[in-house]
Amino acid sequence: MNATLDTGIDLHCHSTASDGTLSPAAVVAAAHAAGVRTLALTDHDTLAGLDAARTAAASLGLHFIDGVEISTRWRNRTIHVVALDFDPAHTMLHAGLAGLQAQRCIRAAAIATRLEALGLRDALPRAQALAAGGQITRAHFARLLVADRLCRNAQQAFKRFLGTGKPADVKCDWVPMAEAIGWVHIAGGQIVLAHPLHYDLSRTQLGNLLRDFQLAGGVAVETSTATTSTEDRARVAAMARAHGLCGSRGSDFHDPSQSWRRLGAAAPLPESLEPVWARFRVPPPVCPLQPPVAAFSPASPPS
Ligand code: AMP
Ligand code: MN
Ligand code: MN
Ligand code: MN
């Protein structure tokens, strides 16, 4: 596979339907302006932004892929899987995601109670107002902690309050990974293991995760994100290949102010991997535009 074939493809980003800050139509417009020619919107546990994004993409001539990033559970850990190119009207997918959305509401109330005890005023109504009808995520609480100057930035909010084992870390009983993969299969889609290096897994554990993911029907691993180094990309690609998995590419864009994950900003797929988009029902157009992949070097979030 030629690296030039994946220029202009971004298969992982967020809008106000979950924890992004741009509306779905604005994400599409920003992606188009950034040179993205095939885009999947992949909000957390919701399909709510897809219609608006699809309409905006059609008016710009951008190739749009329906997507969603599903919060799942594997061996007591939260694992994100990105579903792509499914039937967005499929009842089972909607029903499954509705269960996760209900859990998000319940968890938000529990997180708010803990943060209020730690000094954040009116945490729940303010988080609900920020989410404005979209899914409430920990990222919304992080923004409140920053706005009230209880934390310097979102990273610090996770480090001090919201991250694993921290005072406002409320466990959520997400769907078992294999079950979520089943929903997506039935809806005709492809499923990608998101950001495999974000789970703090040993090499053996990551190998086990890839094996279980593949056995359950997972198709691809996100080998190229906006923050993956060349070495990590090669390492993950080798593991993906060993487990018979394809590769995928996505920025995980959330907000234009986050310079380390811009729309379209991810290195090309390693040449040795089949791209997940080769399995899409309608193949994405080959894009003649060249983002500066040769000079690509991942940026890091502030610590
Ligand atoms: P949730 O799905 O509600 O648990 O929220 C998780 C979201 O919070 C992720 O999708 C990220 O957007 C954001 N997030 C997770 N960890 C961090 C971190 N350490 N710093 C900043 N944002 C984070
Ligand atoms: Mn997010
Ligand atoms: Mn994720
Ligand atoms: Mn994401």
Image (cartoon, rainbow, N blue to C red):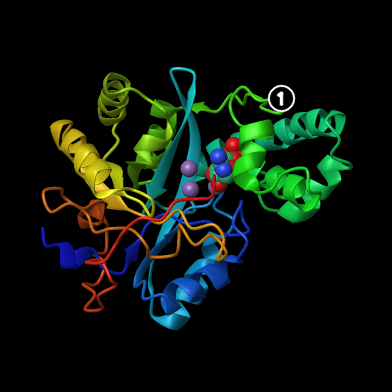
Q: Residue at x 31, y 69 (%)?
A: 8
Q: Is residue 23 left or right of residue 270?
A: right
- Quadrant in which the C terminus appears: top right
Q: Name the residue beneath numbered marker 1.
A: 167
Q: Residue at x 61, y 51 (%)?
A: 19
Q: Quadrant of residue 211?
A: top left
Give the percent coordinates (x, y) of residue 167.
71, 25
Give the percent coordinates (x, y) of residue 274.
16, 50
Give the percent coordinates (x, y) of residue 111.
75, 32
The vertical placement of 39 against 100, above or below, is below
Could you tell me if residue 101 is visible in this image? no
Q: Is mark 1 within 8 Å of ligand 1?
A: no
Could you tell me if residue 178 is visible in this image? yes
Q: Is residue 186 left or right of residue 56?
A: left
Q: Is residue 53 left or right of residue 203?
A: right
- Quadrant in which the N terminus appears: bottom left
Give the percent coordinates (x, y) of residue 122.
88, 42
Q: Kindly give the residue lying farthest to the right in the view shown.
A: 121
Q: Residue at x 63, y 61 (%)?
A: 21
Q: Quadrant of residue 193?
A: top left
Q: Quadrant of residue 201?
A: top left
Badge 1 amino acid: Pro
Give whichever of 104, 236 is nearer the camera.
236
Q: Is residue 52 left or right of residue 239?
A: right
The vertical placement of 67 against 24, above or below, is above
